[in-house]
Amino acid sequence: MLEIKYTIDDITTLMYVDQVHIFSNFNKQWVTAASLKTGDKIIARNGSQASILRIVEVDTRKPNAELVAKLRDVKLSHNHHFFVTQQPQSALEVSCEQPPNDPLELIPYQLANKPSYLPNGEPTGHHSGPWVAAKYVDEVGNEFIGWGRANDRHCAEDAAVIDLKDKVADVSLLTQQNVTISHAYIRKYSKRGRLINTMSPCQYCRDNYGMALNDSRVGNSNVVKPGRDHLPIA
C-alpha cells in the first residue's frame, strides 16, 4: 500500500491506496498510483487539482501503532474516493456523489467539501456546514451571489440570503421569484467514509423562501432560531 501526501485547495493531507489504484492526471490520462511521482498533479471529482508532495510505501502486514491509527481514521483512509478514477472499485466509490454541474449548487458543495483536519489532527478551520448559496440577477443581467452556513441564530438558507442582501444595493427588489436558493450541503464522516450530503429546508425556510428554493423537499428539523430572514412572494 502507498501513503500519498498531497496538497489541494491550500490544504495538505494524506490518502492510502493500492499501487494499482487508477487516478486521472492533469492531462486527463489514466495513471496508476505506483507510477506517480513527487510534483505530479491528479484531478479531484470537484475539478480541483492535487499536487503530490510525497509517496511512501507502507507495510500493512505488520503496521505500527501510528499507521493503524491513520488507516482507521475515515478522514484519511477514504480520501482517495474523492478523486477521479477509471472505474469504481468499491460500493463506497459508487455511492460517492459527483459534484453538481450547476454553478450555484457548486459553491456550497465546495465549501462543505473542504477538509476539517490536517494530517496531524489540527483543525483547518473549514466548517462542515450546512452551506447554502443564493443568487439574484438584476434587469440588466448583473449577477449577485451570497452564501453562508447555519448557526444557532439562523439556517443556512437565511445566512445565504443575508449575505446576498449585503451585496445588493436595493434589497426591496429581492423576491421569491427572482432569487434562486441552492440545496444545503453538509460534510459528514461515517463508517462509509467522508460524505457530502444535502439537507432539506425546514418548514420555516419553506414558508420564508418558498419558490426560491431549489430543493422541493421539507426537512425534519424545525428548530426555532431568532435570526431568520425571508423573501416576499412578489
Image: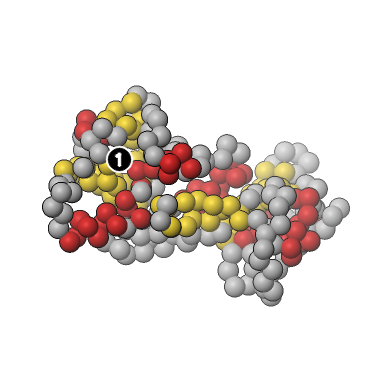
Q: Quadrant of the N terminus?
A: top left
Position of residue 199 relative to residue 18, above or below, is below
In the rendered structure, the answer to whether residue 228 lies left or right of residue 195 reads right
In the rendered structure, the answer to whether residue 225 lies left or right of residue 77 reads right
Q: Position of residue 109 (x, y in %)?
A: 53, 48
Residue found at x 26% / y 57%: 70
Position of residue 178 relative to residue 86, above or below, is below
Total tally of numbered discs in the picture: 1
Who is closer to the viewer here, 146 or 49? 49
Q: Position of residue 148 (x, y in %)?
A: 58, 59
Residue found at x 61% / y 56%: 199
Who is closer to the viewer here, 32 or 110? 32
Provide the residue designation for mark 1: 51
Tag 1: amino acid: Ser
Q: Quadrant of residue 68?
A: bottom left
Q: Position of residue 60 (x, y in %)?
A: 18, 49
- Which element type, helix, strand or loop, lies under badge 1? strand
In the rendered structure, the answer to whether residue 157 lies left or right of residue 80 reads right
In the rendered structure, the answer to whether residue 28 lies left or right of residue 157 reads left
Residue found at x 47% / y 61%: 127
Q: Quadrant of residue 44?
A: top left
As drawn, the residue found furthest toward the right would be: 234
Position of residue 218 relative to residue 41, above or below, is below
Q: Residues within 10 Å of mark 1 (few under 14, many from 20)?
A: many
- Residue 152 shows in the view: yes
Who is closer to the viewer here, 83 or 104? 83
Residue found at x 24% / y 44%: 4
